[in-house]
Amino acid sequence: MKFRTCIVSAMVLAPAAVATPALAADYDPPIFVEEAPEYVPVEVGSGWYIRGDIAYTSERSYKDTATRLTPGLFNAALVTFEPALPVSVFSFSEKELPVSGSVGFGYHLNDNFRIEANLGLLYADKYSGSGAVGRTNGYLDPSAAFGCDGTYVRTTETATTTYDADGQQASSSTSFETDERNARESCGVAATLRNSAWNGTVNAYADLGTFAGFTPYVGVGGGLLYTRTKFNVSANCKGRQKVTVGPVTGDAGPGGTTTQTTTDESFLCNDTASPSESRTYNVASYRKSDYDFLYTLNAGVAYQVSDNTKIDVGYQYVDAPDVKGFKYHQVKVGLRYDLW
């Protein structure tokens, strides 16, 4: 009985004994860490570029043409900018800036075509003059005589001195003579005229291939022309005063008589309190702004100076068909910088 029990126990324990070493020989499976995908940054600005240009034009579209004003321009009769009545001793100068500039950005559609948007100053000029002009009711009037209304006063003082037999002053007397009347005196006038033009365009270009770093191109564009004119005339009216002391005439010896004349001549404008005071009047002013269509024709060549930078030398023709005489031929030099 005991022997049978031992065999049964052995049969029961045998599988467990065999299983125990097998479990002890087991090991943990390897841990596999999945690698993160390599980070590739997204290109920002791919295909875009910025540019800046300066341009020169030898033309003077407004030279000698903006110096004349037509009557009725300011709802009042105005003078013309020329040495004629009612302007006297009129000096004139004009300055026109031949250099302009622009900035913009563009996008490469592909290796051969690109588009650009540009904003720039096309030209600026300034005219100025000074002289003397008549003023009536606050504005220039070609039919008026020179000057502002006022009062002219001329006072002549005559001092007489007599001497006795010993050459001593015996008596003296003073007499006055006054001439007073309404009069007109000339006023100084200053005039300035400024013209300026800005443009905003969109241009399309075709790059014709690159040869030894040089890329010729042609292009066409269109946009808006903004023109602005400012004109201002101011008059400075001032009185005057002049005192003239004449020489002593006659005999200052015994029994003699001497005379001396002093002249006080003055003009007082009606709008001033004293001859030395002046008044400046805004005689006329004019402001005008316009928007018109313009188009451009372009040609040039770009040279690659670095990976992202090109020097651009080109020609541009600018025309605004609705603006008389507005045609420009420009030579432009600029830089283009690729943003990729």
Image (cartoon, rainbow, N blue to C red):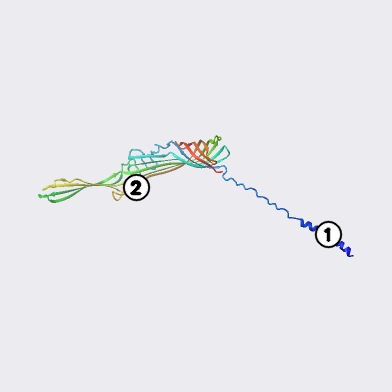
| Residue at (34, 47) in percent of width and height | 280
Residue 178, horizontal then vertical, whole percent: 22, 47
Q: How crowded is mark 2: few (under 14 residues within 10 Å), some or many (20 or more)?
A: few
Q: Is mark 2 on a helix, strand or loop?
A: strand
Residue 335 visible in the shown view: yes
Residue 304, horizontal then vertical, whole percent: 53, 38
Q: Residue 209 carries which label?
A: none
- Residue 18 against residue 153 in the figure, above or below: below
The kind of residue on which mark 2 rests is Thr
Q: In this view, does 271 lie to the left or right of 118?
A: left
Q: Is residue 258 left or right of residue 219?
A: left
Residue 165, horizontal then vertical, whole percent: 9, 49
Q: In which quarter of the image is the N terminus?
A: bottom right
Outermost residue on the left side: it is 165
| Residue at (83, 61) in percent of width and height | 13
Do labels 1 and 2 touch, CB within 8 Å?
Answer: no
Q: Mark 2 points at which residue?
A: 280
Q: 125 or 72, which is in the foreground? A: 125
Q: In which quarter of the image is residue 183?
A: top left
Residue 218, horizontal then vertical, whole percent: 53, 35
Give the distance between the C-alpha atoms of the residues marked 1 and 2, in whole angstroms.
Answer: 128 Å
Circle 1 or circle 2, nearest the eye? 1
Q: Name the residue under label 1.
A: 14
Q: Quadrant of the C terminus?
A: top right
The numbered mark, 1 or 2, whose residue comes first in the sequence reads: 1
The kind of residue on which mark 1 rests is Ala
Q: 58 or 201, which is in the foreground? A: 58
Q: 80 or 167, which is in the foreground? A: 167
Q: How crowded is mark 1: few (under 14 residues within 10 Å), some or many (20 or more)?
A: few
Q: In this view, does 113 lie to the left or right of 95?
A: right
